[in-house]
Amino acid sequence: MSLRIIFMGTPEFSVPTLQSLRHAGHEIVAVYTQPPRPGGRRGLDLVKSPVHQAAELLGIPVSTPVNFKDPEEREKFRAFDADVAVVVAYGLLLPEAILTGTKLGCYNGHASLLPRWRGAAPIQRAIMAGDKKTGMMVMQMEKGLDTGPVALTREVEIGENTTAGELHDKLMLVGARAMVEAMGKLEAGDLPLTPQPPEGVLYAAKIDKGETRIDFSKPARDLHNHIRGLAPFPGAWFEAEINSKPERVKVLLSEVGVGRGEPGTVLDDALTVACGEGAIRLLKLQKAGAKALAGAEFLRGTPLGPGTRLS
């Protein structure tokens, strides 16, 4: 026996779950993903999402609706006669007609320990807040934003220097295994659902470009969390005077350093920078249009010696 599943997802994060469900023997009757977006080297080509590409390799039919307002689109969804819909980072809010458009409803793989970090950017927000652990949860979807009852939880530790990219890759695989386990239990009629507690709700708002700039007036620990929570994308950044003009530099790796001084001042030849409290050492940097470099290599081409002010 196997479930008839409609899979809904878009980015690379979703792909292992799609592949794992297929390998577990479930029938993926359709894949829904975001429409192709402009991309390529010049940004002129329409590029299919990672899930779209993975589904085509697996020979699964793909749908890319802009939304589900069209009654024909909703009827098409129901016509697949699926047992369940599995949703992982799809990127569209689902109306009631879709949430109830399968026999057993919709189940979402969400990268946090709900109700903490409901919303769009749970991985980044957990690191930026200095959380020591997070996880993947499989929950039954309802109208509210990530408010549904939880079916299965897998916790993951967050190391002191873990970046968002590293945590993303770990949770991506944990989530795939968790969803396969959950769908096996659902097929067997043995998937318990636990309502989320009303306490501890936090929302993981989408990362805004305006919050990516590094504010050296903040404590070093907060800045370290900020940098690793935005690495590698979109990347936290500062400005410095380079070749007599201000230039933006991303910081992709850091550690809490030793020292103190005027916030934003480079303290030594190892890119230790004074903060509002303590100091931070910048370990991996990237100028616009250039490749990312380790601190020592970066300094060989871009002198930011002691006394340089970063802002």
Image (cartoon, rainbow, N blue to C red):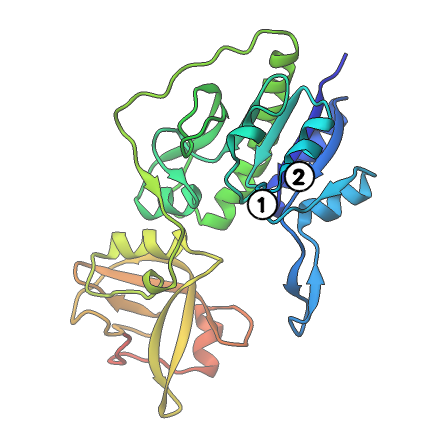
Disc 2 is placed on an element classified as helix
Kind of residue at disc 2: Glu
Which residue shows up at 53% across the image and 36% down it? 94
Q: Which of 179 and 297 is in front in this view?
A: 179
Left or right: 23 as drawn, with respect to 33: right
Task: Determine which quarter of the picture holds residue 209.
Answer: bottom left
Q: Where is residue 43 in the image (x, y as percent from the top left)?
A: 64, 71
Q: Nearer the viewer, residue 66 or 285?
A: 66
Question: Which residue is depicted at the point 56% across and 23% down?
Answer: 100
In the rendered view, would you say 243 is above or below 268? Answer: below
Whole-percent x, y for residue 78 in the image: 68, 27
Residue 230 at least partly seen: yes
Instruction: Name the disc covering residue 234, or none.
Output: none
Residue underneath mark 2 = 73
Q: In this view, does 44 lie above or below 36?
A: below
Would you name the residue on which mark 1 appears?
Answer: 67
Image coordinates for residue 201, horizontal then vertical, percent: 29, 32
Mark 1 to mark 2 CA distance (whole Å): 8 Å
Label pair 1/2, CB-CB below 8 angstroms: yes
Farthest-out residue, right: 59
